Amino acid sequence: MRRLIRTLLLVPLLGLAAPALAQVPMGEASTVKEGLEIGTSTSEIAIASDFRGADLTIFGALTNADELFLAIGQYDVVVTLEGPRDYATVRRKERVFGIWMNTESMTFEQVPESYSLASTRQIDSIDEAPSLNNIGVGIAHMPLNPVGYISDSGSIREFRDAYRRLKLANGLYQRDTSGVQFVSSSLFRASLKLPANIPDGIHMVRAYLFKGGQLIAQRELPLRVVKTGIEQAITDAAHERPFAYGFLCVLIAVVTGWGASLLFRKD
Amino acid sequence: MTVYLPIAELSVNIFIILGMGAAVGFLSGMFGVGGGFLITPLLIFYNIPPVVAVATGANQVVASSISGAITHFRRGTLDMKLGCVLLVGGLAGATAGVWVFSWLRRVGQLDLFISILYVVLLSTIGALMLQESLRALRRARNNEQLPLKRPGQHNWVHRLPLKMRFKKSKIYLSAIPVVALGFGIGVLTSIMGVGGGFIMVPAMIYLLRIPTSVVVGTSLFQIIFVTAYTTMVQAATNYSVDIVLATILMVAGVIGAQYGVRVGQKLRGEQLRALLALLVLAVGIRLAIDLIVTPEEIYSVAVGGLSY
């Protein structure tokens, strides 16, 4: 019998988790598969235009965890928040006749616009690179597939490195290798950083449970990020009703120009 | 105090934008120019994306040109027929320009193209203006007389077919160079976010031999409609007009212009032109330096849409 712990608050979880663990006797855990549950306090985040970044806390619990493995810290949790996916084009400048201009470019398929990662420790010490590449966890391991055929593998690596560096630099990609902390033997809390320039749309919270370097469980939850406020209303208007928006811009210009000439008229 | 620009997607200090608008407005009032060729580079220097700077610059020119056009309309120094022929070319040029603009943006060469156009245009015009005003200053110092111009003289432009009679300007002129001039200015409006008066006025005077009295009013008439049209098309195709940025610039600009006009009336023309020439040159040189200096980061990322 598996007891699912699906709740948002830490306090009731603490009470429930202890009896849950008590039902799994030592040594028998290897026959029972471990489970992973996560919860967020909301499925939607509203962000005002003065948003300067925040932390998103996600609670989770391991079920059927092996006491022995827990005691020696063999369980690792990685939680990520992936933004909506889109194509991304990386361009490189070169000096041409003394002027710096974009010469080469590479477009990557469907990469997350934002990516925030929290883990119990350095993810490269949790698992080996090839298997991390396989599951695509971590900024250095997420798949970056160029569109079209590119024969020069050296330049692919350079463009991938540049992409990751730029995304980390502007804060859209973040990682916190101590962002997941166990609050009790089987309960953990993950703090994910939301960047100030977080894109709106459907984000995905993904949690991965590793046991002795093996991925054994995975969970995901959608999280909608909605921008609110007058600035977002303007952005929406500009994209959804471009003609009306353009007309309004011209109208403001006419009123301002005409108004000034009336206001400052001397005769 | 910071204000968030929704289209440019960045927070700026409102007082810097107000100051920019007022300063450019002041200069445009003082020198009688639209100010688009100053506001767009200034916005780029302040890290506003060039795409937004150009489209918003065009919007700002609508406001700064309108009061001048109204004045000329009242005084009767506006040739409506000539303005409409110019406008035909201008609207076609702006359409072509926006198309080129979107294409350059797609292939990732827009920022470079805008900078190069500005460097070429500003340094050429700045140098010509400086040369002319220095000559005028020297002449004034030596009390020389102006060499007599002979406006009646005809050039190749006047041998072209499709002639039309423009009553107000009292000229009989082929429509081809007028439409072509309008077209060229329209392209510049949509790619550079300028009104183009600083090119159109000399071209009308020296190339088309249109009487000076109607030149400014007529060019302002065409500028208003072409910049308004460009604003609409940019908003519809590139979603790049920032209404918040534009409003701040326009309000500060029209107020600054009123004071600029008053100061401009007190200063002497040649000195004023030399000053403007130096300013134009400085902006051009600054942009040229940005093109040549090795950038800190040679890579850039653009999100969305398949592009090569």
Image (cartoon, rainbow, N blue to C red):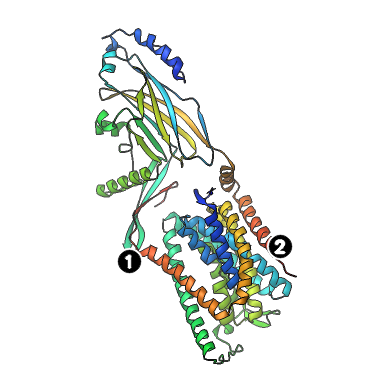
Instruction: Give the image location of residue A88, x and y in percent.
Output: 40, 46
Q: Given the image, what chain letter belongs to the residue carrying mark 2?
A: A
| Horizontal side, residue B284 vs residue A248: left or right | left
Does residue A198 appear in this view?
Answer: yes
Q: At which x and y percent is residue A63?
A: 36, 15
Q: Quadrant of residue B80?
A: bottom right
User: What secondary structure is marked by label 2?
Assistant: helix
**In this view of the protein, which residue sits in the foreground, B205 or A168?**
A168
Can I make out residue B87 in this image? no
Residue A215 shows which numbered tag? none
Q: Nearer the viewer, mark 2 or mark 1?
A: 2
Element under label 1? loop
Q: Based on the displayed image, in which of its 4 quarters is residue B210 positioned?
A: bottom right
Badge 2 and badge 1 in a common chain: yes
Which amino acid lies under the numbered mark 1 shown in the image of this protein?
Gly
Q: CA distance from mark 2 to mark 1?
A: 50 Å
Observer-nearest of A140 and B153: A140
Q: Quadrant of residue B19?
A: bottom right
Q: Residues within 10 Å of mark 1 (few under 14, many from 20)?
A: few
Label disc, if present, on residue A263 of the rendered structure = 2
Residue found 27% across the figure and 21% down from its top: A73
Circle 2 Cα neighbour tier, 10 Å, few/some/many (<14 / 14–19 / ≥20): few
Task: Name the subunit of mark 1.
Answer: A
Foreground: B60 or A242? B60
The amino acid marked with disc number 2 is Leu
**Mark 2 and 1 residues: CB-CB less than 8 Å, in contact?**
no
Q: Is A153 located above or below residue B64 in the figure?
A: above
The residue singled out by tag 1 in the image is A98
State the image coordinates of residue B183 (x, y, percent, origin top left): 56, 69
| Residue A24 spot, x, y in % from top left | 33, 9
Judge by depth and name the residue closer to the eye, A48 or A113.
Answer: A48
Seen at 68% across and 82% down, the residue is B170
